[in-house]
Image (cartoon, rainbow, N blue to C red):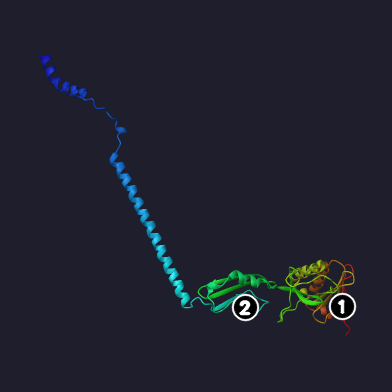
Amino acid sequence: MGGNHSSWLDFPFRRIINIMVQDESPVVPVDRIIPMKKKKKKKSNNMLTLIKMIGRIGLVLLCLFIFSILLLKSNDWCRYTDVFNISAINIQGNRILTNREILDMANVDMDSSIFSLNLIEIQNRLEKNPYIEAASVSREFPNRVNILLSERIPICYLNHNELFLVDADGIILPVPDHPLNTNLPVISGFDNDSLDYISGYYVPNDAVREIIRVLDATLTSAPQLYSEISEIHYWNNSSFILYTIKNGTPIYLGDKNLPDQLNILANFQNRLKGKRDLSDYQYLDLRWNKQIVAKEKHS
């Protein structure tokens, strides 16, 4: 009975095993099953993203096209209504040249459109003038023109058969028609120089350029002395005589180092402490070593 009971219990399980053996379908591992539905969904999402991107680009291009059309039409309207016709020219940076002189050089037609200006040509015309070291010309919408200048500032006159002005770099400048309203020292004594002195070019004489350099240094280090100098005259074998503005008092500097002599004179002027001027003396002589000979005026 026990054997029969065991046979009765095993029957269903044997049948299930036989069925599994008879099924020859290959068994696919779980990790190798490809989720086809998910792949199709991802491909669909990519296509949708691409369509959206193309739509956005098309919208941007359309907006740019419409904006360009509006800009061109508004520009045409402004030209038609003279909105861009030049109404004012603003000039800055000029200390020597007058506004009238600059406007004549710029030669800007006040009835023309601001778009018709050739800014580079105007700038080049301005920079042909020896006084203008650099020029910048710009438009200020809707109808203004700005001219910004950097001028060469003269620091002394140069008397060479005729009178010139010279800046700190040694550039020769013409004497303007209007007064400068400032006292500048004169360099003289080079009339026999056969070199050509041309406005807008460097002084051709090395000795004159050295005097200009010394005067520029004096203007910086001893402005009070610089303001007292009326003339510095080259004479008698590389010797110099300085004349004061007031009374034309001669100061004999000799043939020694010019910067050193002017430094000695500046120190002497400082010791006077404003109680006396250099022009209060009949003359001053710095040709002696370590001393200044001061000749008092006769009362």
The image quarter containing residue 176 is bottom right
Q: Residue furthest bottom?
A: 299
Question: Can see residue 46?
Answer: yes
Say which label, 1 or 2, has the lower sequence index. Answer: 2
Please say if the residues under marks 1 and 2 sit with CB atoms less than 8 Å apart.
no
Residue under the point 46% across and 73% down: 76
Q: Which amino acid does label 2 sit on?
A: Leu
Counting from the top left corner in percent of width and height, residue 197 is at 78, 72
Counting from the top left corner in percent of width and height, residue 31 is at 31, 33
Q: Name the residue under label 1.
A: 283
User: Observer-nearest residue: 21 or 17?
Assistant: 21
> Residue 219: which numbered mark, if any?
none
Q: Distance between the residues labelled 1 and 2?
A: 48 Å
Q: Mark 2 falls on what kind of element?
A: helix
Circle 1 Cα neighbour tier, 10 Å, few/some/many (<14 / 14–19 / ≥20):
some
Quadrant where the N terminus sits is top left
Q: Which amino acid does label 1 sit on?
A: Tyr
User: Observer-nearest residue: 224 or 36?
Assistant: 36
Question: Can see residue 229?
Answer: no
User: Observer-nearest residue: 156 or 268?
Assistant: 156
Quadrant where the C terminus sits is bottom right
124 horizontally vs 14: left or right? right
Counting from the top left corner in percent of width and height, residue 226 is at 77, 74
Circle 2 Cα neighbour tier, 10 Å, few/some/many (<14 / 14–19 / ≥20):
some
Counting from the top left corner in percent of width and height, residue 156 is at 76, 74
Q: Mark 2 points at which residue?
A: 103
Relative to 265, residue 59 above or below: above
Relative to 66, residue 31 above or below: above
